[in-house]
Amino acid sequence: MEKPPVVAVINSTEDIVDLLRIWIEQAGFVVVGTMTSLIRDGEVDVEQFIGQHDPLVIVYDISPPYEPNWRLFQHVASLPVMAGRQVVLTSTNARQVEKLAGLQVPERAEYIRVITAELTRLLNHTCLAGFLLQDMGALGTPASAPIGAGAILPIVIPNEFMYARGHSPPKGASRLILQP
């Protein structure tokens, strides 16, 4: 039986290492991980780590502060044990990493970034408006909703709201319990 390929995850956040581990393992890979801070502080010997696990791919995070972490990546990438290895760089700020790496992004990619950012912004605002409208009761009222077990039924009586199923009415209002 052939041993599954290994992916090394080097990230600044332990939670992200764990999250990537779950996703990558579901794809059938073995995942080994370490933190960039442990490499920087000398607690993990990256040459020994890479040599011991022999990863097919290394997923490396460039996190803030970008310049020192970029220099750390350049140092790691220049090690003899890294020769011929595939590296996937991740970052929360791709533009900053591109600037540090001296990469020129094609104009088409910039257009795609702007379109994606605008669609994301539009989606976020649409969701927010939907939640606000729902909270205000504009998208449906209990009278238009089907009545089932556990339903909250506001009954309007002049100057009072009464709620069914034991929920608290507004302060100073009467309370009416309806049994299903």
Image: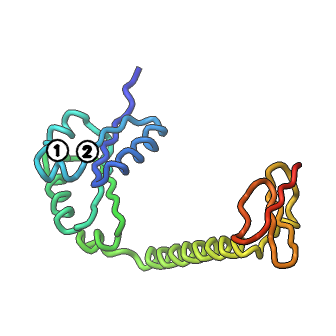
Please tell me which residue is depicted at 83% across the width and 60% down the height of the picture.
Answer: 176
Q: How far apart, in angstroms, are the residues tagged by discs 1 and 2?
A: 9 Å
Give the residue type that dot 2 points to.
Thr
Report the disc number at residue 46. Answer: 1
Identify residue for label 2: 34
**Residue 36 relative to residue 148: left or right:** left
Q: Earlier in the sequence, mark 1 or mark 2?
A: 2
**Residue 44 relative to residue 155: left or right:** left
Q: Position of residue 18 (x, y in %)?
A: 38, 44
Please tell me which residue is depicted at 16% across the width and 44% down the height of the picture.
Answer: 46
CB within 8 Å, label 1 to label 2: yes
Instruction: Find the residue positioned furthest to the left.
Output: 42
Q: Residues within 10 Å of mark 2 (few under 14, many from 20)?
A: some
| Secondary structure found at label 1 | helix
| Secondary structure found at label 2 | strand
Please tell me which residue is depicted at 73% across the width and 58% down the height of the picture.
Answer: 167
Q: Quadrant of residue 55?
A: top left
